[in-house]
Structures are given as C-alpha cells and as structure tokens.
Amino acid sequence: MKVLILAQPNDGHTLPIRWALQQAGYQAVCWGGLSWTEEQQASVFLDGESRVVLGPHAVEPGDTVWIRRPDPPTPNPKVSEADRKFAQGEYGAFYHCVAYMLEMLPARCINKYSAYRLVANKAVQLHLARASGLKIPKAIMSNSPRAVISFFDHNPSRIIWKGFTPHVWERPDIGATAATETFELNRNQLPADEILTYAPGIYQDMVDKQFDVRTVLMGNRAYSFSLHSPDKALDWRHEAGQGKIHVEAIATPPDVERGIMAFAQRTGICFGSIDFAVDMDGAWWFLEINEQGQFLWLDHFDRTAAILQKFCAFLTAPEGSIQPLEERASLFPSFAEYKKFVEREGEPKIAAAGPDSPYVSRES
C-alpha cells in the first residue's frame, strides 16, 4: 500500500509526515491538486472497472488517500478569455468527480470528500454536535441586521463574534498583517445596519471559560490537550503563534468522548481537529471542528504528545482497525527527530504568495 497525500509537497504538515512515513519504510507520494500540468492532471476510468489516476499515481486497492489541502482546480492559463469561465467551471466539476470517485474505490480516504463537504458547514457542525450529545453555545449566523439586533436584544448573555473562515490579510510591501479573531461584542458596538450586510457573521453566547481544549480525532481515538494562555485570551490562536500558551495532554471526559464518536459517525469523518471551551463548572462546550486543521503544533508545545507518530500510525492502519495507535506509534520517528533532521539537512521552502496575491488565507 502507499499513502497518497493530496497537497503540495512543501505543505507544512505534508513535509514532516511524508518524511516520517518514508523513514518507516512506507511509500508516501503527493498530488498537488487538479491543474493543466502533466503532474497535476487526473483521469477517471470507467471501462469495466473504476479507476482513478492522479498525475503519475494510480490509486490502487489498499491505498490510503489523505485529502490534506489540494490546490483549487486551475485551468490552463492559455485558454482564451471567451472560454475562461467555461474552462473554470469544467475544472471545478471534474475535480468533484475525482474527489467523490475516490471514496467509491477500495481505498481508504481521510476524510471522504462527501464527509468533508458536509462537516465544513459551520451550522451543520453545531446542529450535529448538539444531536450527538455535545453542549453548544446558543448562536445565530446571519447577514440580516434585523435578526442580529434581535439576537442581542433578547439575549442576556455576553456575546462574541467570529468569522466563518480564519483569514489573514498580508501586505508584504509595508510589512503589515491583519487577521480575523474572535472578539466580544455588545449591543452598543454594533455598526450601522448596512455594514452588517457587508459580510455574514457568527454571533454566539460567550462561554465563561477556565481554558480551551484542542482535541484531535483519529478514528476511534480522541486526543485532548488543554490550552492555557497567560492573558486568558478569548481567542488563543494569536498567543499560540507567539509561543505563549501552555499545552498539556488531558483526559477526554467519557460523555464528551461518546459525543465525539457519535458526531464522527453522523458526519462520516474519521479525522479532525475540534475546539472546546471548558467552563467554570468543568463542562466542555463544542465550538467547531476543522477536518483538516493544523495539529502538529501540539508536538511543538508538548514533546510527549507524539501526534506525528500517532497520525502516521493512523494513516497506515487498516480501515476500521481497533488496535490502539500507541502500539504502532513507535514505528515512526518523532516530530523532534524531524526537527533535528531539518537542522542537519534542511527542507524545501514553503512557496510564497505570488506578486498578484492581495492576501494569504491560513487556518490555525
């Protein structure tokens, strides 16, 4: 079997994981996403048996396909201007064909594209989390000034705002950076009605929390880590980026773990990064899940976490395996060993944004 990673080879998570897999003797290859170049072309064969070929790689029975973060479908730039919109639509439709066909094959997908499409929806996340027995804060998602104002007027709780997608605006020419962050908002701070229509938002009851939790779901295991920031920040990501948070492995409460597994079954996902807030009474509140969120940073803050090794064990385990990942994690080098390798040998540079890119988007 081989592990086929749908991402550019210099992706920040692909690099160490591919290296660790290869060190353990596994074949790990990359496909950057659908494009016009030979290495990023794709074919779906329906000629007696169904087959998918991604660039130079055929998806074979028993393979694991990790749909990490492939590039958006990109048509040939030489297509005429009159045909550009058509070509873009055809590339998008064909990518959907490819991605959905992968889960029709006798190969393991992490995650299935259909599950990703479902769980990427923030409203569906919260709805299914609640249906799975997890606590969720009361919320409204809207671009309607009337609905937003009513939510504030009829809600005695403290309220936060957050965006649907984390976003970073970068201006390399002047060295400026701005980012979306979760923040508290009261009724008197609401802008004019028209401004509320500029971009939809998520308005949600604020959890009076002791600390945050990042839980990494891998199959039938959930690994939880408490996140303590010195300033008790509402959004811990900024302080994490500055190395200011304390990360510690903690036990997932049994009722929360049951809720996570029920959520995974309802959505069809087998992997993802889940954010919880733990309130003053010790209750865990589900905030969101990113099914391909960043997770190796946990090994940076907690050297005992062994997330890289556990994830490699997860990637290479048979689908549906109940063997504890810890029993196979030692087959793979640690994140610390990868960092030592990089210090000694170096690694490819992450591709920078092109000169015409007004901003770069990132997810923590």
Image (spheres, rainbow, N blue to C red):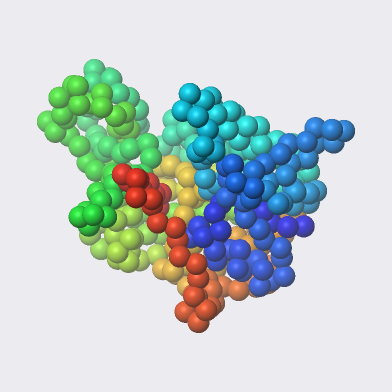
Q: Where is the N terminus found, in terms of image quarters?
A: bottom right
Q: Residue at x 47, y 33 (%)?
A: 121
Q: Residue at x 56, y 58 (%)?
A: 9
Q: Judge whether 125 appears above or below 270 on screen.
A: above
Q: Judge whether 345 appears above or below 257 on screen.
A: below
Between 344 and 155, which is closer to the camera in this rendering?
344
Q: Residue at x 49, y 75 (%)?
A: 346
Q: Would you say residue 118 is visible in this rendering? A: no
Q: Would you say residue 339 is visible in this rendering? A: yes
Q: Residue 202: x, y in percent?
A: 33, 33
Which image quadrant is residue 196 in?
A: top left
Q: Residue 109: x, y in percent?
A: 67, 45
Q: Residue 54: x, y in percent?
A: 68, 46
Left or right of 208? Residue 21 is right
Between 286 and 279, which is closer to the camera in this rendering?
286
Q: Residue furthest right?
A: 48
Between 8 and 157, which is closer to the camera in this rendering?
8
Q: Residue furthest left?
A: 188
Q: How many marks?
A: 0
Q: Residue furthest top?
A: 146
Left or right of 98? Residue 256 is left
Between 102 and 35, which is closer to the camera in this rendering?
35
Which image quadrant is residue 159 in?
A: top left
Q: Residue at x 58, y 33 (%)?
A: 91
